[in-house]
Amino acid sequence: AQSVTQPDIHITVSEGASLELRCNYSYGATPYLFWYVQSPGQGLQLLLKYFSGDTLVQGIKGFEAEFKRSQSSFNLRKPSVHWSDAAEYFCAVGALGGGYNKLIFGAGTRLAVHP
Amino acid sequence: NAGVTQTPKFQVLKTGQSMTLQCAQDMNHEYMSWYRQDPGMGLRLIHYSVGAGITDQGEVPNGYNVSRSTTEDFPLRLLSAAPSQTSVYFCASTTENTGISPLHFGNGTRLTVT
C-alpha cells in the first residue's frame, strides 16, 4: 500500500540551530514528492517539490530536501532555523503524471522554535 | 489577488443539521479540491473537480456532496452533519491536475459538530 510516514510528531529546536525533518514513503511507481508548510490559522504553502533530476532540491525560505531512492526518503533540511519557521510541516507523495487526486499526505511534524 | 477564499472560518453545527462550506478562487484554475485535516492523519481528499461540470470522489467522500457549476466556485455540502465530521476543511486549487503547477490552499474552515 502507498503511504507516507513522518516519524516525528513534534520537534523543538533552538533558534539558529540546524533542522532536519524526516519523511519516508512507500510508493510503487516513480514518485513525485512535496513538502508543505502550514502556519497557524493558515492553509498549506508549498516549500519545494521533486519530480526528477538533481536529487537535492532547493525551496523557499532557505529550505532544501534530498531525495534518496535507496532509502525511500525525502528529508527536509534548513541550516539555521528562525523563530518564524515554527509551523507544521507536511510531506506528500504522488505518482509522476498521476495528478493531485492521487497525492498522499503524511501526518505532519509540528516544529517549535525556542529563542 | 484574493487567491482561494473559504467561508465561513468557523462553524458549529448540531448533529443532523446541514450546511455548505464555500470555496471560491479567482485564478481561473481548472482543478479544485476539498480536504479534511484531522490530528495525526494529515490531509485526506474528500472530492475534487477537474473543471466545471465535472466532479469525482476522493478518499473520504461519504457524507459530503459537491457540485461545480462555474470555474470559480466549488461548494462542499454536508446534508446531515455527524460528530465524525468535526474537522478542519481546506479547499485547494491549481491550473491543471498534472501535479506540476502548485496547489493553492485556502485558510480553512474549522467545523465542530455537537
Image (cartoon, coloured by chain):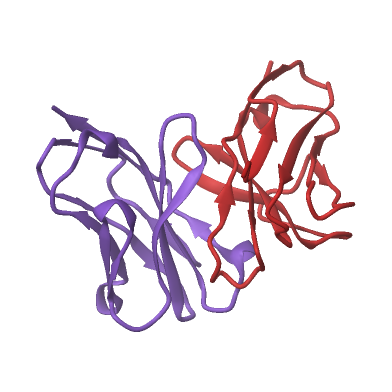
Q: What color is chain B drawn in? A: red
Location of residue A45 with respect to B81 vertically, above or below? below
Quarter holding residue B7: top right
Relative horizontal placement of residue A18, taking residue B54 as reference (left or right): left
Q: Residue furthest front?
A: B1
Location of residue A96 with respect to A62 vertically, above or below? below
Percent across and percent down for residue B68 are 85, 52
* Chain letter, colour purple: A
The C terminus of chain A lies in which quarter of the figure? top left
In front here: A7 or B5? B5
Percent across and percent down for residue B63 are 78, 39
Relative horizontal placement of residue A47, taking residue B93 as reference (left or right): left
Q: Residue furthest bottom?
A: A53
The residue at the point 42 percent across, 30 percent down is A40
In front here: A22 or A85? A85
Percent across and percent down for residue A25 are 38, 65
Location of residue B94 with respect to B3 vertically, above or below? below
The residue at the point 45 percent across, 81 percent down is A30
Relative horizontal placement of residue B1, taking residue B26 as reference (left or right): left
Percent across and percent down for residue A113 are 20, 33
Quarter holding residue A76: bottom left
- Number of labelled discs? 0
The residue at the point 13 percent across, 36 percent down is A15
